[in-house]
Image (cartoon, coloured by chain):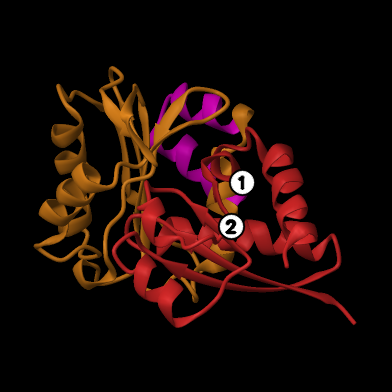
Chain colours: A orange, B red
Amino acid sequence: MQILKKELIVMDVEAGSSEEALRVMANHFVDAGVGKSSYPDAIVEREKNYPTALPATAFDIAVPHTFAEHVNEAAMGVCVLRHPVEFKQMGSPDITLHPQLLFMLAITDPKDQIAILRKIMKLIQNEEALNKIKDAKSSDEIYDLVSELLA
Amino acid sequence: MAKKAKILTVCGSGIVTSSMIANKISEMLEEEGYDVTAMESNPSELETYLLRDKYDLIAYASPIDESCLNGTPALPAIGLLTGRGEDEFKEKALEILANRQ
């Protein structure tokens, strides 16, 4: 199953805050038809209550996602921010991280999507891949790289 | 007969991250000869899960209310997502499973 969508790979996003970055990305999910109209608010709300940034080996990243009721179709997007913004760390909301790379997920049923979730987990542990994504020159380059790693 | 381990994973929504963690722990413990049952939950459901059933180990990716654990061992599991501290988690988990009553 291909959950990575080309139209959900967004580069050079200028955002002054995590909320702004999340809304830019989440709106793309709505435009692509994979997120319901409630998806952006749900993503922002979920991030406030249960933050999703992780201190990955290469640099900080975040994996924003929300409840399946806001999702039409399973999808994954990649957002490269022009500058890192402040997010809170998953599990430790008192720790501030500075991700520049977001992997936004729309998950309908984790049981169905466990194989892909496992590959996403491997991806966020892959220092070389994360660096390549951050330094990519085009969204096609990111698409090809991530598709290969999730195949 | 395989040794059994019953794990409860906890994350913010009780879906995505807890499934990733559950999958990772299952792989980890199956390598060590355990037959693993894993359930996923979120912090607000945790107490109900623990009243309904008994678990050998809780692995959490979001802060939990320790007062409802009632003696169930719990380990932070963010390291399983980042890949940092995986070995330490495994060591502690195996120790907890070996020492359970």
**Residue at 55% over, 75% down:** B54
Is A20 colored magenta in this rendering? no
Write down the chain letter for disc 2: A
* Badge 1 element: helix
Tell me if I can see residue B65 in this picture.
yes
* Residue A27 visible, this orientation: no
Residues at badges 2 and 1 in contact (C-beta under 8 Å)?
yes
In the rendered image, which residue does mark 2 sit on? A118
Q: Return the chain for callout 1.
A: A
Q: Is residue A10 left or right of residue B6?
A: left
Residue toward you, A137 or A43: A43
Q: CA distance from mark 2 to mark 1?
A: 6 Å
Type of amino acid at the residue the image marks with label 2: Arg
Secondary structure of the residue carrying numbered label 2: helix
Report the front residue among B81 and A108.
B81
Q: Quadrant of the N terminus of chain B?
A: bottom right
Residue B55, given in percent of the width and then of the height, sits at 58, 70
**Image: A106 above or below B45:** above
**Which residue: 63% across, 27% down?**
A128
User: What is the span of residues highlighted in magenta in the rendered image?
Assistant: A129-151
In the image, residue A56 lies at what x, y percent? 52, 30
Where residue B14 appears, x then y in whole percent? 38, 64
Q: Which residue is mark 1?
A: A122
Q: Judge from the rendering whether residue A37 lies leftward or rightward of residue A142; answer left or right.
A: left
Q: Give above or below for A103 relative to A70.
A: above
Front residue of A100/B64: it is: B64
Amino acid type of the residue that numbered disc 1 sits on in the rendered structure: Lys
Q: Residue at x 39, y 41 (%)?
A: A91
Residue, x 42% and y 32% (percent of image)?
Answer: A61
